[in-house]
Amino acid sequence: MDKSILKGRWEILAWEQVYDDGRIVRPMGEQLAGFIEYTDSRMFVVVKPADRARFTGGQWSASEAERAAGYSSYLSYAGRYELEGNTVLHHIEHSIYPNWEGGVQRRNAVLENGVLTLSARFEEGTSEARTAKLAWRKV
């Protein structure tokens, strides 16, 4: 993989998690909205359901349930990135999930028929071991 291939904005097409026990989960449903953008050295990603529910009140006066649903229906992080062959290393500086900040997320990158698939393994060695696959198309 070459940075010139990654550079630019890619819209999300699909996100699925394939568990080792055969389950397939689409964490934010079938219809998604969002993008991943790569510059020369930085990246930013945001993914949400296309029909994400709005709060009934103000941002700071929303109920605990609305805030929890808002957090659960949004993925976003940003930072530097680098390439090692077909592996993209996302060096997380900012994330809606604070545990990722300061860490590195490794993504295997495959470009086929104009679709970029970024995949990663999570929770290896547990009953929740899975491969997350996100598919993107260049805008």
Image (cartoon, rainbow, N blue to C red):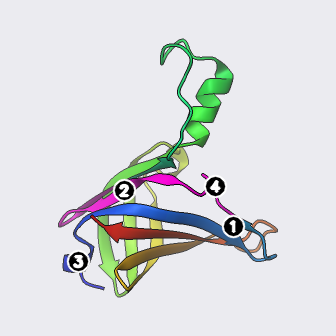
Query: Mark 4–mark 2 contact, CB under 8 Å?
Result: no
* Comes first in the chain, label 3 or label 4: 3
- Residue that appears at 76% across and 65% down: 128
Q: Which label sits on residue 3?
A: 3
- Residue that appears at 17% across and 67% down: 40
Q: Which part of the image, by quadrant, shows the N terminus?
A: bottom left
Residue mark closest to the camera, 2 vs 3: 2
**Could you give the CA–CA distance between mark 3 and mark 4, rounded to whole angstroms?**
28 Å
* Comes first in the chain, label 1 or label 3: 3
> In terms of secondary structure, where does tag 2 sit?
strand
**Could you give the CA–CA distance between mark 1 and mark 4, rounded to whole angstroms?**
16 Å
Residue 109 occupies quadrant: bottom left
Q: Residues within 10 Å of mark 4 (few under 14, many from 20)?
A: some
Residue located beneath label 1 in the image: 123
User: Which amino acid lies under the numbered mark 4 shown in the image of this protein?
Assistant: Pro
> In terms of secondary structure, where does tag 1 sit?
loop
User: Which amino acid lies under the numbered mark 2 shown in the image of this protein?
Assistant: Phe
Residue mark closest to the camera, 1 vs 3: 3
Residue 138 included in the magenta stretch of the image: no
Vertical relation: 39 (above or below) 65: below
Residue 116 occupies quadrant: bottom left
Q: Residues within 10 Å of mark 1 (few under 14, many from 20)?
A: few
Q: Which residues are magenta?
A: 25-45
Given residues 29 and 94, the one toward you in this image is 29
Vertical relation: 47 (above or below) 38: above
- Residue that appears at 57% across and 37% down: 71
